[in-house]
Amino acid sequence: MGKMLNVRAARPEDAGDIVRLIKGLAEFEREPEAVKITEEDVIEHGFNEDPDLNYFCCLMAERDGKVVGFALYFFTFSTWEGKPALYLEDIFILPEYRRRSVAKGLMVELAKIAVQKGCARFEWAVLDWNVDAMDFYHAMEGSHQKEWQIFRMEKDEIEALASTEWE
């Protein structure tokens, strides 16, 4: 019998574990130097006293009281469906706990949240080289939206666009 998995909502005191897991994800995604987030950022943007300033939610996965993974998500809106959508920004499991139902436990809990919130969609992105993750998502009946391409602007581009005259 495997050790019990506990999936729970993150709390402010999890900020250090969240940052640690984000850094682990960055190493896995081959960009360890790209992480700028701090525990203060986690508190400010996820556990702010003003609910309008909370931009994400997070689930923590624990085995025997040890945090072994997380899923960070937020809600978007589908204009075509006229309903909210749950967007999974990041999911990460410590390497030694992979293939032990931790990711599945997190995905099941996220699906339950999506149902509870009346979401028409549950979406996420995966790097094109992460075949293990794609296989996992396909096994859970996730469908690859090949026709969609992700676009992004970084801070400098956003500021340049924001300062552009449009009339």
Image (tube, rainbow, N blue to C red):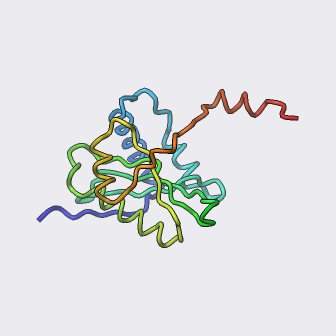
- Answer with left or right where residue 129 lies relative to residue 13: left
Picture quadrant where residue 146 is located: top left
Picture quadrant where residue 49 is located: bottom right
- Which residue is drawn at the image coordinates 52% and 40% (left, top)? 149
- Which residue is drawn at the image coordinates 56% and 58% (left, top)? 75
Instruction: For the C terminus, give its image quadrant.
Output: top right
Residue sitting farthest toward the front: 147
Question: In terms of depth relative to the viewer, which is nearer, 25 or 13?
Answer: 25
Question: In terms of depth relative to the viewer, which is nearer, 28 or 132?
Answer: 132
Residue 9 in picture, x, y percent from top left: 43, 62
Picture quadrant where residue 163 is located: top right
- Answer with left or right where residue 92 lies relative to residue 157: left
- Which residue is drawn at the image coordinates 40% and 54% (left, top)? 143
Instruction: For the N terminus, give its image quadrant.
Output: bottom left
- Which residue is drawn at the image coordinates 63% and 66% (left, top)? 82
Residue 165 in picture, x, y percent from top left: 84, 31
- Answer with left or right where residue 34 lies relative to residue 66: right
Residue sitting farthest toward the left: 1
